[in-house]
Image (spheres, coloured by chain):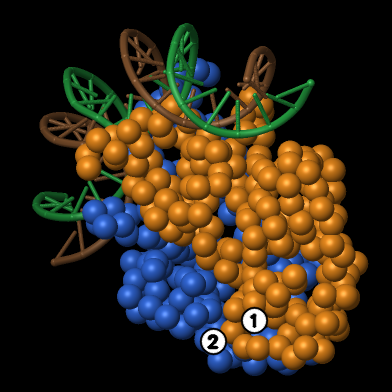
Chain colours: A blue, B orange, C brown, D green
Amino acid sequence: MTKILRENIEKTIDQSITDKEFEIFTQFFFPKSFDKKSILAEEGKTCKYVYFILKGSAYSYYINDNGEKTVIQFAIENYWITDQYSFFSERPGIYFIETLEPIDVLVLNRENYDQLCCTNQLFERFFRLLLQNAFIALQYRLAKTNSEEAESRYLEFSTQYPHFVQRIPQYLIASFLGIKPQSLSRIRKKIADQK
Amino acid sequence: MTKILRENIEKTIDQSITDKEFEIFTQFFFPKSFDKKSILAEEGKTCKYVYFILKGSAYSYYINDNGEKTVIQFAIENYWITDQYSFFSERPGIYFIETLEPIDVLVLNRENYDQLCCTNQLFERFFRLLLQNAFIALQYRLAKTNSEEAESRYLEFSTQYPHFVQRIPQYLIASFLGIKPQSLSRIRKKIADQK
DNA sequence: TCTATTTCTTAACCTATGTGAATGATAAGG
DNA sequence: CCTTATCATTCACATAGGTTAAGAAATAGA
């Protein structure tokens, strides 16, 4: 059941861990399930948890002053999601996190996160690498957002994350790409017509 | 001279460090100077260093398939800059880093970075916090890029980083905001006319 | 100081994407 | 199974921002 977590760790730190180490690691988590459309974190409230997704999907989003939603991140099985700002600073959050499908997660609170990092250098390293990878991917995404048109951003997204395209509503993908659903629809039509 | 580095560390980890600790820390760095328009890192070549800026300014950018430049980050005194992807993975870089003004930097190579992190938990924590803060700022910037118009992005940028507006050419600020110089000029005119 | 280069501004026109509204399609709930 | 939300598509029109080109202003070099 938690096999995918172990794979996730070993892939991230690029080395295998012992059964013992993995057991220690998982002791700091507790499993939880949520219905579709559950709110896992809310703007204005401290985001107390990091979630690792075992089954189902979720996404985080920002709501601007005009009440418009912008998708920050999608997360399916094997992904981590949280409001990093709020989780690390323990201040009121700036993003929402909401489930897209019914979801099974492993939950880590801040206290356990800190302890886990103290327990073993390996675990601290793991979380550092997670953040590092997330940062690098985000920087690249911003570079693309600022330098490519919506069509090529969508093409890159759909080839890189085909499993997302299948499971996630188009209006959310549009938001993730920084465009309106109607525009994405138009872009998809154009691509389909070209074939 | 390296006083600003010490301030940078203490502010980031939110605690003061001893003279001894600071001395150890700086031993891993070597100072260097570059002329204006020097290339500190190059796409395709491994970025071997992290730079801390003592004096002067630099910026990193991405060049897309059409040869168009997009600014990733600006850095002036008291800022850190590198190609994180390349530096941490030791693979060929994806961004350029170039000086804007003549520059004095403290340079840290990968070997020293690793050693420094091993030497004292405090130093490792420092670099983790640097990355964490950079991630959080970047995520927010992307949220704004995808949800706000260029005009309000420029207004936010210029109020948040007035010292950047003074020292950095407008065509680079435009690129940072994801628009063309002509558009930024138009936006500035509109703002000026409104007053 | 003079000249050449770089940067900024302006303007006319163009295009990608936004807006609003209507229609269909799909999925969800009783 | 029917009813109601939710989501996707399409279209006509509006607009922010891109493009091209020219000239002005600022800066750097000789």
| Lateral position of residue B32 relative to residue A58, left or right | right
Specify whether residue B53 is in view.
yes
Q: Which chain letter goes with mark 2?
A: A
Residue type pointed to by label 1: Glu
Q: Nearer the viewer, residue B29 or B128?
A: B29
The C terminus of chain B is located in which quarter?
top left
Identify the residue shown where x is 46% and y is 35%.
B179
Residue D13 placement (x, y as % from top left): 17, 20
**Can you give x and y, in whole percent of width and height, for residue B101 in the image?**
68, 45
The residue at which mark 1 appears reads as: B10
Residue A110 - label: 2
Callout 2 amino acid: Arg
Can residue A17 be seen here?
A: no
> Quick check: A102 above or below B98?
below
In what quadrant of the picture does the N terminus of chain B appear?
Answer: bottom right
Q: Residues within 10 Å of mark 2 (few under 14, many from 20)?
A: some
Q: Position of residue B138 (x, y in %)?
A: 53, 58
Q: Nearer the viewer, mark 1 or mark 2?
A: 1
Is residue B119 shown left or right of residue A58?
right
Nearer to us in this view, B16 or A44: B16
